[in-house]
């Protein structure tokens, strides 16, 4: 199975504080990989490093088959990212956002129009094409941010706490989208502090105080820790 | 290249759509231009004069009427005691007191010293200087008249006289508005260049969209150009707008080449946009950006000679001004607009702006990082 | 912190040292068509006055425009030919002063000073010929003997800084609470709105007063601006003005939607008008009537008047009670309006 993310001995320090303490893990192509942990455990630090937003203090990191130190731009061409803030331009319309982000990735003209239509159809948002992002409900913004991040067909998409502040039903629907995406062969790397979402992933890792304390499929972890829910797994670790 | 096109598209859409920003960028400067330029003047007119004439002679009356007849002075009060007149100074109801001591004329005739006293409210230094100068001139004129009479009477040596003719070039009406308007226009351009562009950038940081951009394959220089060009264009538009208004309202001419003016403006804008960008990369909140910008701008503008001449500043200040882009630009504006100076006259300013511009832009590019 | 003290002190230093209208070492040039002893003597007098620096001697009349366009020479003194002869034989000779009037104020100062020097020479010349005595003048500069610019600007700077910093800091701080939502929490508590606001404002009141102190002391020690009047009165008036500025800040926070707007209003909409219309740099009496009227609503105008009077004139409350009353009135008005707006929003 092709490895889409390879991390070896990743260390990230901010002055004297070690946010990531010697992490080693791999993510396989097509996986839905859940990166769990409490707030402050170091999840966001890791994902920012993987996306090229932050430089590691030391360690080897390869994303989408490229070295993040030497081949940054190739990495960026092949990844997508959705932050907690959703990051679409509130004062631009849906169509304008698509036009902009598409253009940056080199998708223009007919191809872009095609993708735009397909995207909107998939989300059942055709009527929202010319609406300002700022005028849309939170759940819609969320799905749009996700879909726009996939516009350039990246090999892997990074989601940093994508379901924060959204109601359970919308959360569930969002995960449907994630399944769809993974089924198409795109790897999904998602961080979350909702332990129930862990159940939806193929494999998860749990971070605590800068270290990975557990990494396996949800089922295996529950067996390993002898508990019924991931939440309990987490609680055992955190103690 | 294409990428830059998309960035510019997005920027302009956002700016044009911003209902509060756009009018602010045009109306506020316009208002300021108008109010400031009309208000700012060091001209001294209608100087309130109080006379204490204890001589009541022909000579003293001659003196007083000369003052009264002058367009600069308004003879408001006549007092009998200097102390009463001093009270007026304390109250602020008079600007200058002329005290003619008793026995003035007699002194003159006998050939002794004849002194009048001028008590000037010097709280405003500039005004005081002018009041004193005007008074001296009037006294000198009276002296000449006295001499002329003497000559007629005594037939002695002809008195000598040097006629001084004042010629005021480039602004013969001594219209202070013509001095202020180019200065204020420079300020407006500066505000757009440093302030607005920096604010815009930090806003993206706060919203998270600049992070989103950092994840894309967009290159640093593309991002920077995309951020600078819209405000560069807006700055030049604002300059054109301001010049037009100044021409309509103040009759401000543009004696030099418009091309040269806008060329320099473009050079200047590029430099301070770089500075604004640099400030916003090291700031984290819009608040910080505002403060830092305000701080630098105020210093640059004041030292650049907007209100008071650079020639009057202490030597160390004049030296520091070589690092002040606003100083160069204000000079350029005033010279080109009022005097019609051409490029050869402004070589020093050109060099200064170019060096500073390259420096600021380099700092900006160097400090902006996609990866921390 | 840095902002709170750094900005005021830097501004003070700049206004005290850099912003000046005094003439010294102003570069001028001479175009002398005669080059005789009289012109040489006159040129010497001009040179040794301390006001001017003789930068160039021009050789042709055409170079006048050239040199002025470069923008460094501010005046050219032109002596006509046969100057000394004309003076002797005809009793009159002509000098032209060509001044660069792109800065009209400087131009006027330069020409009047030059004329003064020339006039002085004429008087001495005639006295030497045994002419009758002339009226001389003895001048006393009241309140500011050396006509120093710093006397004029330091009090004004104080007003400006107090106004800006107080109004700005207060409005931003309160608006920030509005933005982050903590204001609502406070309002929901049993605290009276007045207490909340007072709590926010008090630290800034203290800081501003400390600022004022620092400014007065620097002004006094570094720039030798005297405190001719009662220090106690000075302090009281400063506290009054600071309170007013803080209330202004509160008022701004009731109309501003977010921090950006609050900052914008405080800095830009407040600062420039305050500088220009308060009499800080430009004398109000010489402005167009409309603007003079406008300046009546500038609180800084009154404060500057008061401060200058106390510091430079050394007079007491009997002279400045009117201005004080106005400031007091403004403060009360601002409080009233702010309280009202606050109540409206609560409903």
Image (cartoon, rainbow, N blue to C red):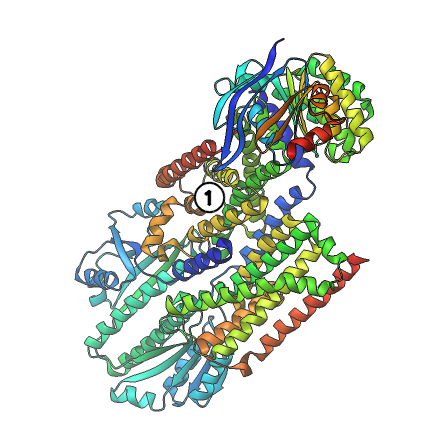
Per the image, label 1 sits on a secondary structure element best described as loop
In the current view of this chain or complex, which residue is farthest to the left?
C37
Image: A66 above or below C142: above
Classed neighbour count for the residue bearing mark 1: other residues with Cα under 10 Å, few (<14), some (14–19), many (≥20)? some
Towards the viewer: C171 or C161 = C171
Number of labels in the image equals: 1
In the rendered structure, the answer to whether residue A32 lies left or right of residue A42 reads right
- Tell me if residue A93 can be seen: no
In the current view of this chain or complex, which residue is farthest to the front?
A226
Give how far across and how far down residue B112 sits, in percent: 25, 87
Please name the residue that numbered disc 1 is placed on.
Answer: B255
Give how far across and how far down residue C77 sits, in percent: 29, 57
Which residue is pictured at 26% across the width and 64% down the height? C49
Towards the viewer: A63 or C171 = A63
Give how far across and how far down residue C218 sits, in percent: 41, 66
Image: B27 above or below B147: above
Towards the viewer: C253 or C276 = C253
Give how far across and how far down residue B158 sits, in percent: 23, 74
Which residue is pictured at 81% across the width and 22% down the height? A126
Say which chain tag 1 marks: B
In the rendered structure, the answer to whether residue C202 lies left or right of residue C41 reads right
In the current view of this chain or complex, which residue is farthest to the top?
A1
- Tell me if residue B289 can be seen: yes
Q: Quadrant of the N terminus of chain B?
A: top right
In the rendered structure, the answer to whether residue B331 lies left or right of residue B4 reads left
Towards the viewer: C271 or C341 = C341
Image: B12 above or below C336: above
């Amino acid at each position: 199975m092709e490895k889409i993310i390879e991390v070896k001995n990743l260390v990230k320090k901010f002055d004297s504080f070690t946010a990531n303490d010697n992490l080693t893990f791999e993510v396989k192509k097509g996986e839905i990989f859940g990166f769990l942990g409490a707030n402050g455990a170091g999840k966001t630090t890791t994902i920012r490093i993987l996306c090229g937003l932050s430089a590691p203090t030391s360690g080897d990191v390869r994303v989408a088959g490229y070295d993040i130190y030497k081949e940054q731009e190739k990495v960026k061409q092949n990844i997508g990212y959705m932050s907690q803030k959703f990051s679409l331009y509130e004062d631009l319309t849906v169509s304008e956002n698509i036009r902009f982000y598409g253009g940056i990735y080199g998708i223009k003209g007919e191809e872009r129009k095609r993708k735009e239509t397909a995207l909107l159809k998939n989300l059942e948002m055709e009527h929202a094409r010319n609406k300002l992002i700022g005028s849309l409900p939170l759940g819609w913004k969320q799905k749009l941010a996700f879909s726009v991040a996939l516009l350039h067909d990246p090999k892997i998409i990074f989601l940093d706490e994508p379901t924060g502040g959204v109601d359970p039903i919308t959360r569930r629907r969002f995960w449907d989208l994630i399944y769809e995406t993974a089924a198409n062969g795109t790897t999904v790397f998602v961080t979350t502090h909702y332990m129930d979402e862990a159940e939806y992933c193929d494999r998860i890792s749990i971070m605590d105080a800068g270290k990975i304390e557990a990494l396996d499929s949800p089922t295996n972890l529950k067996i390993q820790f002898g508990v019924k829910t991931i939440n309990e797994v987490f609680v055992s670790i955190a103690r | 290249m294409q990428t830059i096109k998309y960035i510019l598209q997005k920027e302009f859409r956002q700016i044009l759509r911003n209902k509060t920003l756009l009018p602010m960028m045009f109306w506020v400067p316009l208002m300021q231009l108008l109010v400031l330029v009309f208000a700012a003047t060091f001209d001294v007119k209608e100087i309130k004069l109080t006379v204490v004439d204890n001589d009541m002679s022909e000579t003293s009356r001659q003196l007083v009427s000369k003052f009264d007849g002058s367009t600069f002075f308004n003879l408001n009060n006549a007092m009998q005691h200097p102390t009463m007149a001093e009270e007026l100074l304390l109250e602020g109801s008079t600007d200058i007191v002329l005290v003619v001591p008793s026995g003035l004329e007699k002194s003159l005739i006998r050939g002794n010293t004849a002194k009048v006293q001028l008590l000037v409210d010097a709280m405003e230094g500039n005004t005081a200087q002018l009041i004193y100068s005007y008074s001296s001139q009037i006294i000198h004129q009276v002296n000449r008249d006295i001499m002329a009479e003497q000559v007629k009477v005594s037939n002695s040596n002809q008195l000598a006289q040097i006629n001084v003719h004042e010629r005021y070039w480039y602004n013969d009406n001594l219209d202070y508005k013509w001095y202020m308007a180019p200065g204020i226009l420079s300020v407006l351009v500066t505000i757009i260049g440093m302030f607005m562009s920096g604010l815009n950038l930090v806003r993206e940081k706060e919203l998270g969209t600049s992070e989103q951009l950092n994840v894309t394959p967009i290159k640093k220089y593309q991002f920077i150009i995309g951020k600078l060009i819209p405000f560069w264009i807006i700055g030049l538009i604002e300059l054109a707008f301001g010049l037009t208004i100044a021409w309509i309202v103040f009759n401000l001419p543009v004696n030099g080449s418009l091309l040269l003016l806008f060329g320099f403006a473009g050079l200047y804008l590029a430099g301070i946009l770089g500075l604004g960008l640099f400030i916003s990369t090291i700031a984290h909140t819009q608040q910080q950006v505002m403060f830092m910008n305000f701080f630098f701008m105020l210093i640059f503008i004041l030292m650049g000679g907007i209100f008071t001449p650079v020639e009057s500043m202490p030597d160390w200040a004049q030296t520091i001004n070589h690092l002040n882009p606003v100083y160069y630009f204000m000079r350029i504006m005033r010279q080109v607009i009022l005097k019609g100076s051409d490029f050869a006259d402004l070589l020093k300013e050109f060099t200064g702006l170019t060096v500073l511009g390259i420096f600021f832009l380099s700092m900006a590019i160097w400090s902006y990082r996609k990866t921390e | 912190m840095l902002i709170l003290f750094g900005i005021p002190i830097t501004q003070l230093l700049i206004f005290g040292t850099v912003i000046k209208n005094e003439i010294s070492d102003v570069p001028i040039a001479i175009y002398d068509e005669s080059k005789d002893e009289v012109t040489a003597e006159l040129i010497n007098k001009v040179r040794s006055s301390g006001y001017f620096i003789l930068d160039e001697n021009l050789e042709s009349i055409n170079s006048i425009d050239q040199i002025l366009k470069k923008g460094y020479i501010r005046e050219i003194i032109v002596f006509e030919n046969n100057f000394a002869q004309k003076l002797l034989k005809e009793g009159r000779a002509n000098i032209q002063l060509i001044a660069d009037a792109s800065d009209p104020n400087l131009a006027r100062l330069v020409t009047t000073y030059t004329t003064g020097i020339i006039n002085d020479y004429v008087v001495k010349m005639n006295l030497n010929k045994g002419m009758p005595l002339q009226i001389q003048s003895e001048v006393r500069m009241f309140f500011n003997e050396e006509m120093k610019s710093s006397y004029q600007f330091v009090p004004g700077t104080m007003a400006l800084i107090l106004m800006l910093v107080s109004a700005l800091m207060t409005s931003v701080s309160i608006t920030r609470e509005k933005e982050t939502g903590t204001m609502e929490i406070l309002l929901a508590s049993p605290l009276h709105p007045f207490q909340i606001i007072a709590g926010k404002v008090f630290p800034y009141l203290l800081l501003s007063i400390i600022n004022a102190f620092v400014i007065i002391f620097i002004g006094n020690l570094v720039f030798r601006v005297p405190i001719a009047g009662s220090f106690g009165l000075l302090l009281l008036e400063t506290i009054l003005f600071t309170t007013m500025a803080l209330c202004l800040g509160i008022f701004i926070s009731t109309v501003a939607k977010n921090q950006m707007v609050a900052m914008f209003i405080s800095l830009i909409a407040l600062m420039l008008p305050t500088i220009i219309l308060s009499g800080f740099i430009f004398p109000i009496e010489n402005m167009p009537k409309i603007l003079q009227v406008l300046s009546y609503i500038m609180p800084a105008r009154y404060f500057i008047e008061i401060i200058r009077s106390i510091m430079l004139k050394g007079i007491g409350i009997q002279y400045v009670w009117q201005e004080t009353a106005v400031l007091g009135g403004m403060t009360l008005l601002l409080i009233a309006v702010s309280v009202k707006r606050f109540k409206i929003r609560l409903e």
